[in-house]
Image: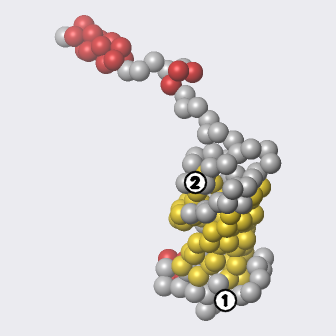
Amino acid sequence: MRRTGFLALAAALACQAPAGPERQRPPAPAPPASARAALVVRDAQAAAAAPVVQLAGLDRFQVDLACSGLADPGPFHVDVTSPRGLLYAQLPATLQLDAQGNGTASATLPVGGTPIETYRMVGTWQFALKGGSGAPLATAAIDLQ
């Protein structure tokens, strides 16, 4: 009976795909060196970005994106990370690029009536503009008090 268990284990291991470089996913293509992106997060009621925003009365965050020199228009998204370091949301960002690869987009993150308000999730919120699963094209942070 011990031999049967060993053979079953050996057969199961033999059926697994090999480990090593052939199993690794290739890295996402990097944007061209000339590509630039800016990410600005602000209180939707404020005209300008502020490094510190008060939770009381906050309806939503406005996320504004501006990109230049991009060859591929997407798909892009903004990863929103909570003060505890956990991914809170992924906001879709549809960039309309002109012939030179320049474009803008915006997204909103609701705050009022969400767990952010209910559980007073205050602290530094991180925002990262990403295309696919590659490295962030731009980042921003805002302190919620």
Residue type pointed to by label 2: Gly
Q: Nearer the viewer, residue 126 or 115?
A: 126
Where does the image place residue 42, in percent across and percent down from the top left?
A: 70, 78
User: In the rendered view of the protein, which quadrant contains the N terminus?
Assistant: top left
Q: Is residue 75 above or below residue 18?
A: below
Give the numbered dot on residue 112. none
Residue count near mark 1 (Cα–Cα under 10 Å), binned few <14, some 14–19, many ≥20: few
Secondary-structure class at tag 2: loop
Q: Which residue: 61% across, 62% down?
A: 95
Residue type pointed to by label 1: Gln
Where does the image place residue 70, in percent across and percent down from the top left?
A: 70, 52
Q: How far apart are marks 2 and 1 (CA)?
A: 28 Å
User: In the rendered view of the protein, which quadrant contains the C terminus?
Assistant: bottom right
Where does the image place residue 17, in percent across and percent down from the top left?
A: 41, 21
- Image quadrant assignment for residue 111: bottom right
Q: Label 1: which residue?
A: 45
